[in-house]
Image (cartoon, rainbow, N blue to C red):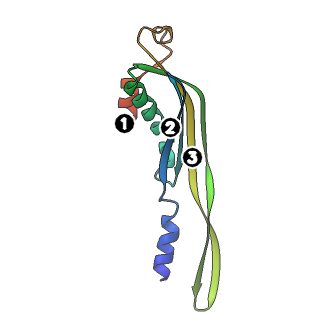
Amino acid sequence: MRRSAVALVLALPLGGCITTQEMPLSPNTVRIDTNAGGWLFTGQTVPQTMRRAATLCLEGGYTHFTVTQPESAQGTVDTGAIASCYRGLCSASNTSAPVARAGATVSFWHPNDQVVKSGQAFDCQQMLARYSQ
């Protein structure tokens, strides 16, 4: 029993997930927000956001995108307390898990748009290749 409690305490910060939400703002602009929890996923918020931006760009028939209002944050969240008892002595400890989020407003562009010609936009194919590794 004690081993399984210790394993649970050690596994809590490792487990987790990553989710991405999109909100269309105009025909060529979308807000992308990515949230992650657990050590395995918190480092993936920016790559996941960029992959999704590149994918949406290509799906919409565009070739490039720009990013405005980028946000990124990391921290921890309290996952509760774990109590353990051994030979009549009990103790409790708080546990926490890492969390992270990234978000940006992304606008999509065609090759002949001025923002692309000026070199101020990301190439969707290049970004997808870069962040899919």
Image location of residue 44, percent across then percent down: 47, 43
Image location of residue 6, percent across then percent down: 50, 74
Q: In this view, does 65 lie above or below 11?
A: above
Examine the rendering and report whether any part of residue 67 can be seen: yes
Q: What element carries label 1?
A: loop
| Amino acid type of the residue that numbered disc 1 sits on in the rendered structure | Ser
Lower sequence index among marks 1 and 3? 3
Please tell me how crowded label 2 is: few (under 14), some (14-19), or many (20+) other residues with Cα within 10 Å.
many
- Looking at the rendered image, the quarter that the C terminus falls into is top left
Lower sequence index among marks 2 and 1? 2
Q: Residue 132 carries which label?
A: 1
Q: Is mark 3 on a helix, strand or loop?
A: strand
| Amino acid type of the residue that numbered disc 3 sits on in the rendered structure | Ala
Label 2, label 1: how far apart the Cα atoms are: 12 Å
Label 2, label 3: how far apart the Cα atoms are: 9 Å
Residue ID at (45%, 39%): 48
Q: Mark 3 points at which residue?
A: 100
Image location of residue 103, percent across then percent down: 56, 36
